[in-house]
Image (spheres, rainbow, N blue to C red):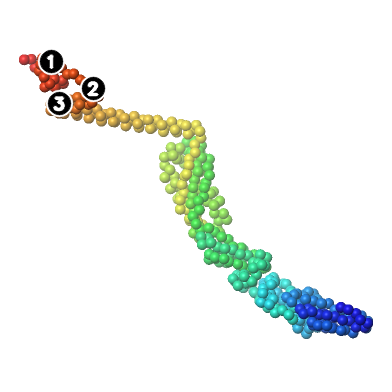
Amino acid sequence: MTWHLLMKTLTVKDGERALLTRNGRLEGVLEPGRHRLFDLRRQLTAEIFSVVRAEFPAERYAVLKAARPDLAAELFEAVETKANEIAIVSLDGRPVHLMTPWQARVYWKVATSVDVERIDVASDPRVTARHLAMIERNRPTIVTEAVVENHEAGLLYVEGRLVERLAPGRHAFWIAGRKIEVKRLDLRPQAVEITAQEMLTRDRIALRVTLTAFRRIVDPERVVAAVPDVDAWLYRLVQFAIREAVAGRTLDEVLSAKAALDAELRDYVRERIADSGVEVSELGVKDVILPGEIRELVNKVVEAERVAKANLIRRQEETAATRSLLNTAKLMEENPLLLRLKELESLERLVEKVGRIDLHAGDGQGFDALLTKLVRFKPAENA
C-alpha cells in the first residue's frame, strides 16, 4: 500500500481479498487488481487475506455477519457442529479437516470449493470404510479401531453396555462424546499350568502336585458376564479341587490311582463351570513331587519290589529248567537209543573243544563195548 497526497494505492493479487474498513467499520471487499482509494483523513485500513483453501477467524466472521450478512454469505462458508455430530470438510474435493461436536470453523469460498459432510454418530457409532479413508490423518483423536481375528470373538461395548458380537475383520467406531470398548476373546484351546501346590495327604505326608488344564471359551457373552479373568478363576478352582482330592487319599493311593484322581478332578471342575461359558476338555496331574526323605523311602520300596520280582522270575526259570531235565532223564531211561544219541552229541561237542581224545575199551572188545559200558543205569548181571 502506498500513499500519494490524498490518495491511497493498494494492489490485491490473485488468490487474495482485502477487507477495507474505515475507522474500524467494514466498508467493502477489494478483489484482485490495483485500487486507488481517496482517503483525506487517512481513516481507511486495508487487510489482505489469502483465500485459497484458507480459513477465516470465526470470531471476526461473527462480527462481520452481524454487520453485513449479505457480504458474509457471499464470501464465507461457516461450518458449525452440534452435539453427537461429526463434520468432514473438503476443500476442492480433498478432505482437510475433521470437526468434532460443538466446533465452529469458517472458510473462504470465493476461490475454493468447500464441501461439508455431516455425520450423526448418535444413531450409529460405526465408521464406514469411506469415512475412515477420508479421516486417516485425524482418526486417533476421534476414532477407535479394532481388528478381530478369525479365531477371536469381538464384543462391542458402548457406555459399558454390551451391544453386539463383532464378526472377524476390521472395525472402527466414533468415540466423540462416548466410551466405546471392544473386548477380544481367543476361542482357541488354551493350556493353563497350575504350578506346584503344597498339600498333605490323609496319612500326613507333604507333597507338591503340578497340574495342566486345557480350556476353551464356547460362549463369549456368558464368559464376560460371569468371569472377569478366565485363567485366574480356573486356576483357583483347580487348586481347591486338587486339595480336596489329595486330602482324602493316602500317598499310595495318590501315586497308584492317578487315572481315578484325574477323573475326579475333571468332574469337580466341570460341574462348577457348567454355566460359565468355558469348557475344560482335559485336566490331569502332571507331576507329583515328594520331599527328599520320602522320595528315598519310596525309591527303596520300589527297588525292593523289583528285586523280589526278579528273584521270583529266576526261581520260576530254575524250576522249569529242573523239570525239563527230569523229563529228559526219564525219556532216556526208558529209551536206550535216545540215550545213545545224547552220548554221541556230547562226544561231538567234546571233540570240537579238544584236539585229541584217546578212548580205551579194554579187553579188546572194540568201540561198541566202549559205548555200551560208558553209561549204565542198572548194574550188570553176573554171568
Q: Is residue 260 left or right of residue 22?
A: left
Q: Earlier in the sequence, mark 2 or mark 3?
A: 3
Name the amino acid, label 2: Gly
Q: Earlier in the sequence, mark 1 or mark 3?
A: 3
Name the amino acid, label 1: Gly
Q: Position of residue 365 (x, y in %)?
A: 10, 18
Q: Is residue 187 left or right of residue 47?
A: left
Quadrant assignment for the C terminus: top left
Q: Judge by depth and name the residue closer to the eye, 98 or 110.
A: 110
Q: Are marks 1 and 2 in contact (CB under 8 Å)?
A: no
Q: CA distance from mark 1 to mark 3?
A: 20 Å
Q: Position of residue 265 (x, y in %)?
A: 46, 48
Would you name the residue on which mark 2 appears? 355
Q: Which mark is residue 362?
A: 1
Q: CA distance from mark 2 to mark 3?
A: 23 Å
Q: Dot 1 lies on which element? A: loop
Residue at far left of view: 383
Which residue is found at the position 51% from the left and 60% from the top?
Answer: 151
Q: Is residue 353 left or right of residue 60?
A: left
Quadrant assignment for the N terminus: bottom right
Which residue is found at the position 59% from the left and 63% from the top?
Answer: 146
Which residue is found at the position 51% from the left and 40% from the top?
Answer: 208
Q: Position of residue 326 (x, y in %)?
A: 20, 27
Q: How many marks?
A: 3
Look at the picture and state if 10 lies above or below 142.
below
Q: Are marks 2 and 3 in contact (CB under 8 Å)?
A: no
Would you name the residue on which mark 3 appears? 340
Q: Judge by depth and name the residue closer to the eye, 167 or 376.
A: 376
Which residue is found at the position 44% from the left and 33% from the top?
Answer: 299
Name the amino acid, label 3: Arg
Q: Which mark is residue 296?
A: none
